[in-house]
Image (cartoon, rainbow, N blue to C red):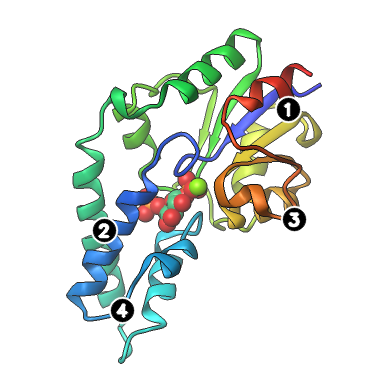
Amino acid sequence: NKKAVIFDLDGVICSTDKYHYIAWKAMADSIQVYFDENINHRLRGVSRMESLEIILERAKREFTEEEKIQLTEKKNQIYQKMLNQMSESDLSGEVWNTLKRLKESGILLAIGSSSKNTKLILERLGLKDFFDIVIDGNDISNSKPDPEVFLKAADSLGVPVEECLVVEDANAGIQAAYAGGFQTVGVQEAAGNEHTTFPVKHFDEIIKLIEA
Ligand code: G16
Ligand code: MG
């Protein structure tokens, strides 16, 4: 009885999370702040500025607001260089087949992402005009775990929350969807979250859930 699926972007539709890590690592190295994969986990789904604040917990000195803006810009430049190398071949067959199948079944499809690079990423993957609605970091004032991004997507689709399914890889995203009253599909680390409605191993299990 679901009419729409709202997908997270990084870590769900594509594996840009590894580029985020490389870019943040380069930024952290440039100011001699320790950063590793474990700290990187805490950045999943949260906004760019909040990510920087988490990284700077390890810094030996304070940074001014202006410096912080410069640091996020530096990180974003490195990140965008990698995004610009992406192409349609970076979209996995499993993701593409699932998206196509859902669309053919008449399910409305949306993106709900914290990323301000969403449009660029969708363009690189050849998905520019594929989704019915795209709500991203440019459209919201509160990032995940706040439910704003998903509530906005449901509202723009014109579908009640109960008839939407949210697909997430990050704990912050599951918290956001749960706070908004959405049922969720959790992949990767989100499969282990206590608030995840349907933990899955493989992305294409979404088809069975929708068609059930
Ligand atoms: C993504 C990532 C986060 C990232 C955020 C902002 O969210 O998971 O790690 O910090 O976007 O990205 P940007 O710097 O590109 O604006 P999501 O919601 O797509 O997983
Ligand atoms: Mg994500």
Name the mark nearer the viewer: 2 or 3. 3
Residue type indicated by callout 3: Glu
Q: Which mark is residue 117?
A: none
Q: Which mark is residue 34?
A: 4
| Ligand 2 within 8 angstroms of badge 3 C-beta | no
Residue under circle 2? 23
Name the mark nearer the viewer: 2 or 1. 2
Please tell me which of labels 2 and 4 falls first in the chain. 2
Inspect this view and state whether residue 197 appears: yes
Name the residue rendered at 50%, 16% in the picture: 97
37 over 135 or under it: above or below: below
Q: Residues within 10 Å of mark 1 (few under 14, many from 20)?
A: some
Name the mark nearer the viewer: 1 or 4. 4
Tell me the element at label 3: loop
Q: Nearer the viewer, residue 32 or 74?
A: 32
Residue furthest out toward the front: 201
Residue under circle 3? 194
Name the quadrant containing residue 65: bottom left
Is the N terminus in the top left, top right, bottom left or bottom right quadrant? top right
Q: Residues within 10 Å of mark 3 (few under 14, many from 20)?
A: few
Q: Which mark is residue 159?
A: 1
Tell me the element at label 2: helix
Residue 63 position within the rendered picture, expressed as x and y whole percent measured from the top left = 30, 84
Name the residue rendered at 46%, 34% in the picture: 13
Between the C-alphas of marks 4 and 3, the distance is 30 Å
- From the viewer's perspective, is 115 left or right of 120? right
Name the quadrant containing residue 51: bottom left
Residue type indicated by callout 2: Ala
